[in-house]
Image (cartoon, grey):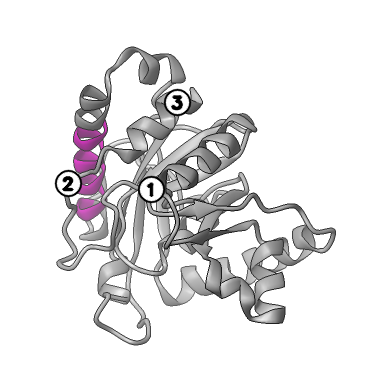
Amino acid sequence: MTHQPADKPAAQATTATVTTSHPIWWGRWLYNLLWVLCRTLAISVLGFRLRRAGRLPRDGGLLVLSSHQSHLDPLLLGLATDRRLSSLARSSLFQFGPFGRVITALDAVPIDRTASTVKAMKTVISRLRGGAAVIVFGEGTRTTTGELGSLKSGFALLAKRAGVPIAPVAIVGAFECWPRFRLLPRPGRIRLEFGEVIPAAEVAMLDERQLVERCERELQELDRRARRTRAGQPLAGEHGN
């Protein structure tokens, strides 16, 4: 299978206030270095593999709608795409000097979990309208069982208000590597399955309920495919890493 380049993490954005991050001159260099190192480790230790139904848009706002299995998910999504993604982090993390500067350089965005959800959503919408690719975990929290949960409607509002396409992706195997009740990750086999991008025109045409149902069906199918290939049952036309 062929390895494909990567993107960058972004936003579980329905819980708090966000502040827009600004590029730092050494951020791109650091990002590229960490990407190569982390990609190598992910493939060799975590059995990282992916399949894409098509390429993601190279520019313009994009909402990456992902299932959520572990703390590894933002990193895995960043290693799977050739666009730099934006991810959200608790504002308290930015208070730790050098660490705060590093995650800012890597496009992390601080969120204040005690502030208004409306402010957080407005910030994410602004980033999407400004052309950023943002990760949103539609279930709202990490799975406790390893199974895909129901989607919350917040992502639909973000995509419709921003007028951007949605890229659905299912992650399978990250729960086994790092479940929420485990202190540290362990080796395993992780599979990412990307679906066809849902165009902005279709996002605009559907109401929020219809869009949630459409994306839920898509993620369920992607999750099923990821589990099959992870179990050694390749699908026709499979490609990726």
Compared to residue 51, the image places residue 176 above or below, namely below
- Any part of residue 197 in sight: no
3 or 1: tag closer to the N-terminus: 1
The answer to whether 222 is drawn above or below residue 131 in the figure is: below
Q: On the picture, is 124 further left or further right than 107?
A: left
Total numbered labels: 3
Q: Earlier in the sequence, mark 2 or mark 1?
A: 1
The residue at the far right in this view is 25
| Mark 2 in CB contact with mark 1 (< 8 angstroms) | no
Q: Can residue 33 be seen in this view?
A: yes
Say which of marks 2 and 1 sits in front: 1
Residue 219 is inside the magenta segment: yes
Query: Residues in magenta?
Result: 215-228
Q: In which quarter of the image is residue 128?
A: top right
Q: Distance between the residues labelled 3 and 1?
A: 14 Å
Q: Position of residue 4 (x, y in %)?
A: 55, 49
Q: Position of residue 91 (x, y in %)?
A: 54, 67
Instruction: Identify the residue under disc 2.
Output: 150
| Disc 2/disc 3 C-alpha distance (Å) | 22 Å
Q: Residue 14 carries which label?
A: 1
Which quadrant of the structure image shows residue 113?
A: bottom left
Q: Tell me the CA gap for discs 2 and 1.
A: 15 Å
* Amino acid at the residue labelled 2: Ser
Q: Mark 3 points at which residue?
A: 161
Q: Is the magenta stretch mostly helix, strand or loop?
A: helix
